[in-house]
Image (cartoon, helix red, strand yellow):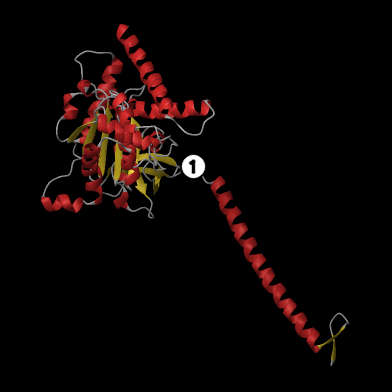
Amino acid sequence: MATLSDDGRHYDENGIIEYLRYLERRVKELEAEKMALRRELSYYKSEIEKLLSPPLIEATVLEVLDDGRVIVKSSTGPNLIVEVSGRVSIDKLLPGSSVALNQRGSAIVEVLPGKTDPLVKGMEVIERPQTTFNDIGGLKEQIVEVREAVELPLKHPELFEEIGIEPPKAVLLYGPPGCGKTLLAKAVAHETSATFIRVVGSEFVQKFIGEGARIVREVFNYARRKAPSIIFIDELDAIAAKRLDVGTSGEREVQRTLLQLLAEMDGFDPLGEVKIIGATNRIDILDPAILRPGRFDKIIEIPLPNEEGRYEIFKVHTRKMKISEDVDLRELAISTRGATGADIKAICMEAGMITIRNNRRVVTRADFLSAIEKVLGRLAIKTSTTTAI
């Protein structure tokens, strides 16, 4: 049966049904488009409001008065007594917290999140080092002590509560350079899920008075916020050398930074789940105040490796190398007396370079002996030259 439409065309019943379905689809498509355009319009309206709204003034809360008003230190200079917006909870307005002031009425309209110095945020190790405790040779006792003092309190604090003792809050690693202090810290960073913050002691030494102490305070506050966390201070002697009665203004600023570090380690604010690892080559020049129990509770020596230690280090650094059958790692350990872990790593690298230079694919005993002579001989020349000077 045919039907005459409004446009003068003839449709049968099937055609009318199809046409109605088409119109329904078009209505749905137009409604969806209408919603998308409304969202886009709302977005651009909010952007225009942002551009036209007056800027807010940052301020620091000094005191909350009994009548509900607040004394703030404005970033523009003067102290102000301001009202509090109804959408801001008065309980969140603590002395020292940052707030935003409306420029027109000077009322607190928002509580700002705590700020962190970009220098301090940059100290956090985001990507975990791939070094594990299995990659460290010759320091079995030291590894056990470090894990007991740092890892165990973070993973199983209930053990210390059950015994009734406080876990160590800080560990100091000392010994000659190249013996594995930083390697131990990398292994701790890999093994634990705690936030790992690495800082070199010299980074605390700043140009302006009070800046070094402020950065120390920021580092510890950041560590508390990110707890459980570990602060690793490398080259600790840069700021913790013995204090002198007289000195330059720069030395006095370093001493002020040291005082702040001492206060943070053993002050009124508890460290909680914040652990500290310090590393130094010169424990003999450190200030006695930082070495006393209550600050660095455990002091661990990282000595030069003995023969067994050198043998284990050679095993660590040659496990991925293609070495010939005539290579005796025990013989190499005996012939490298006095070498550090860093020296042994350099020897293995040099032996590999000699192999590549000679267009071979397997490292031989002769390559290792040449590398030992080159690396240790060069170090001996350097040491004798320094002594002569």
- Judging depth in this view, the residue of 290 and 134 nearest the camera is 134
Of all residues shown, which one is farthest toward the front? 326
Residue extending furthest bottom?
Answer: 1
Q: Is residue 352 above or below residue 35?
A: above
Q: Residue 329, position in %: x, y?
A: 34, 32
- Residue 336 placement: quadrant: top left
- Write down the quadrant of residue 185 in the picture: top left
| Residue type, numbered disc 1 | Pro
Asked if one can make out residue 196 in the rendered structure from this viewpoint, the answer is: yes
Does residue 35 appear left or right of residue 119 in this picture?
Answer: right
Considering every residue shown, the one lying at the far left of the view is: 164
Residue under numbered circle 1: 55
Asked whether 307 or 151 is in front, the reply is: 307
Residue 353 at x, y = what percent? 48, 27
248 versus 176 height, above or below: above
Residue 374 % position (x, y): 40, 19
- Residue 306, horizontal then vertical, whole percent: 24, 29
| Left or right, residue 10 beside residue 318 | right
Quadrant of the image for the C terminus?
Answer: top left
Question: How many C-alpha atoms fall within 10 Å of the one at disc 1: few (<14), some, or many (≥20)?
Answer: few
- How many badges with numbers are in the image? 1
| Frontmost residue, 219 versus 146 | 146
Q: Residue at x 66, y 70 (%)?
A: 31
Of the 4 image quadrants, the one containing the N terminus is bottom right
- Is residue 181 shown to the viewer in this render? no
Q: Residue at x 36, y 52 (%)?
A: 88
Front-lying residue, 38 or 77: 38
Q: In what element is the residue under mark 1?
A: loop
